[in-house]
Amino acid sequence: MTELADFFRSAMSGLGWSERPSILNLDKIVVIRFEKARQALSFTLMERGDRRRVSVEGALLITAAPKPEDDDDDDQPAPIPPPAGPSTLGI
């Protein structure tokens, strides 16, 4: 688990992100928080047996729309929907 955590620390540091203290740093689960330009990302690393899971949370992450099923083989990426705003949230 240490090697995986070190990988993310090195990669994010190389991209200009600064690590922030985290209260969770155990043998089987580690949370690593990064900040850059008033943005934050949080990595959660979990180990269960021989499997590892990494999840990332943060406002910078974008979820792509699923590609519509069609018979075209044009291999064009699906459009990314606009971010949710007052008009799309019904506010």
Image (cartoon, grey):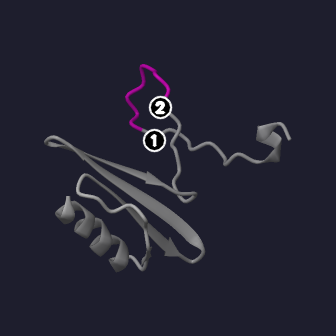
Query: Which residue is at 53% across, 37% downward?
Result: 65
Q: Quadrant of the C terminus?
A: top right
| Quadrant of the frame with the N terminus | bottom left
Q: Residue furthest top?
A: 71
Label 2 element class: loop
- The residue that label 1 is drawn on is 77
12 lies above or below 78: below
Q: Is residue 74 magenta?
A: yes
Q: Position of residue 72 (x, y in %)?
A: 42, 25
| Majority secondary structure of magenta residues | loop
Which residue is painted at 53% across and 50% down in the image? 62
Depth check, front residue: 22 or 80: 22
**Element at label 1:** loop
On screen, 64 above or below 35?
above
At x 57% / y 44%, what residue is drawn? 80
Disc 1: CA contacts within 10 A as few (<14), some (14-19) or many (>=20): few
Front-lying residue, 75 or 7 = 7
Q: Which residues are magenta?
A: 68-75
22 to the left or right of 87: left
Instruction: Give the amino acid type for the residue marked by disc 2 in the picture.
Output: Lys
At a point 25% along the width and 52% down the height, the residue shown is 28
Residue 32 % position (x, y): 39, 64
Are the two marked residues, 1 and 2, in contact with CB atoms closer than 8 angstroms?
yes
Residue 57: % across, % down: 49, 53
Q: Furthest residue to the right?
A: 91
**Which amino acid is tagged 1?**
Pro
The tag on residue 68 is none
First in sequence: mark 1 vs mark 2 = 2
Q: Quadrant of residue 6?
A: bottom left
Residue 74 position in % (x across, y down): 40, 33
Tell me the tag on residue 67: 2
